[in-house]
């Protein structure tokens, strides 16, 4: 028998002074209540309750055991309440990983907004371009650009962003502005070989897909290196919109081939479990998705 259940039943019997009344409150049979108390007595090798056909009372050992049971059961109830509150009220440290640029430009400002309504949550943010083992690293959540391959974790798309092709005004003045994707063969294309869809740039024109294999003097898995090179007029670069927004607004970079639709890229959240997801993870994921929806609506309105 489960000892904790037996302790709860014994405590109720002792306080009510009656097996039948305790059984009714606990929705069990009188025989079951008696069986649990006898099981405790057998394990402890002491008599806890003296019973007669008309009455019952605690023995000295029973009174001492009741006091200890009461303390233990109260501690368990307080612990369960505290843990339940952790799952309903966001608090504690949220440990997560992110690609560097996404972490810097997107998650950083988002975290600052999130902690305003949820001040009980702190963050431990790891930025890396490398695949992470969530369990080994002790992470609550990881963000991954492009759908992860062969993951046994829960995977959820939280953001879809368009890819934008752009270059510095100085580069376009020197080399001309391409008018069609095929003309990129005559340009210096700066590319990230680790960025989905990997080694190719995709464009769509009236439903027709055009695939370009970029070639140029710089390949890098560092978005910052590619962005800096493009700003310094080395060539054309295609990157997620969130990495280029400030540069496009300030005129350091100019978008090209906008009449051709480029492929969007998705950001995924990865986490170990769907059941009993902690409040801090659940609310932060909702916050990311809500922010993503608002940004998409703002682009539509513009």
Image (cartoon, rainbow, N blue to C red):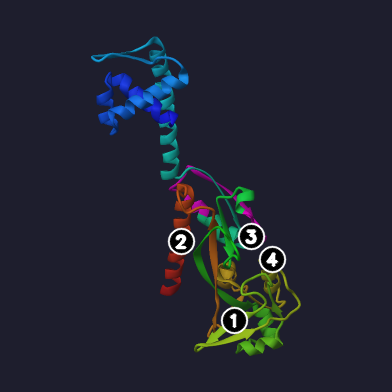
Disc 1 target residue: 202
Question: Mark 2: which secondary structure?
Answer: helix
Is 212 located above or below residue 143 in the figure?
below
Is residue 262 left or right of 289 when viewed as pictured? right
Instruction: State the separation of the CA atoms marked 1 and 4.
Output: 20 Å
Counting residues from the start of the chain, the first of labels 4 and 3 encountered is 3
- Residue 78 image point, x, y percent: 42, 31
- At mark 3, the secondary structure is helix
Residue at numbered disc 4: 222
Query: Residue 254 appears at what percent x and percent y?
Result: 60, 78
Q: Quadrant of the N terminus?
A: top left
Q: Please name the residue shown 30% across and 31% down the image.
A: 26
Rendered residue at 64%/78% (across/down):
167
Question: If the image is split into quadrants, where does the C terminus sit?
Answer: bottom left
Which residue occupies 60% across, 89% down? 180
Magenta extent: 111-133
Pointer 1 or 3: first along the chain: 3
Q: Is residue 302 visible?
A: no
Establish if 30 lies above or below 219. above
As rendered, which of 3 and 109 lies closer to the eye? 3
Q: Residue 118, which numbered label?
A: none
Q: Earlier in the sequence, mark 3 or mark 2?
A: 3
Picture coordinates of residue 59 (x, y %)? 37, 11
The local crowd at label 2, few if under 14, some if 14 to 19, many if 20 or more residues have their Cα within 10 Å, is some
Q: Contact (CB < 8 A) between labels 4 and 3?
A: yes
Q: Which residue is mark 2?
A: 289
- Alpha carbon distance from label 3 to label 2: 19 Å
Quadrant in which residue 48 is drawn: top left
């Amino acid at each position: 028998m489960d000892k904790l259940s037996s302790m709860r039943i014994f405590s109720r019997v002792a306080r009510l002074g009656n097996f039948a009344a305790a059984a009714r409150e606990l929705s069990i049979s009188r025989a079951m209540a008696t069986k649990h108390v006898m099981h405790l007595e057998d394990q402890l090798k002491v008599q806890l309750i003296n019973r007669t056909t008309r009455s019952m009372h605690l023995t000295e050992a029973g009174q001492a055991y009741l006091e200890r049971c009461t303390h233990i059961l109260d501690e368990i109830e307080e612990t369960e309440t505290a843990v339940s509150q952790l799952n309903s009220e966001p608090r504690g440290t949220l440990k997560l990983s992110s690609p560097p640029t996404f972490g810097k430009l997107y998650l950083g400002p988002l975290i600052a907004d999130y902690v305003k309504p949820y001040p009980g949550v702190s963050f431990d943010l790891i930025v890396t371009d490398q695949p992470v083992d969530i369990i080994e690293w002790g992470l609550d959540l990881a963000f991954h650009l492009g759908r992860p391959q062969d993951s046994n974790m829960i995977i959820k798309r939280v953001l879809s962003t368009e890819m934008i092709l752009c270059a510095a005004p100085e580069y376009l003045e020197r080399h001309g502005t391409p008018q069609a994707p095929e003309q990129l063969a005559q340009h210096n294309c700066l590319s990230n070989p680790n960025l989905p869809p990997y080694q190719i740039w995709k464009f769509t024109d009236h439903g027709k897909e055009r695939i370009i294999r970029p070639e140029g003097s710089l390949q890098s898995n560092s978005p910052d290196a590619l962005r800096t090179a493009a700003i310094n007029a080395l060539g054309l670069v295609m990157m997620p919109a969130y990495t280029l927004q400030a540069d496009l607004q300030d005129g350091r970079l100019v978008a090209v081939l906008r009449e051709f639709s480029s492929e969007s890229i998705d950001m995924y959240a990865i986490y170990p479990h769907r059941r009993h997801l902690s409040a801090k993870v659940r609310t932060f994921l909702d916050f990311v998705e809500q922010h993503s929806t608002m940004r998409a609506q703002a682009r539509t309105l513009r």
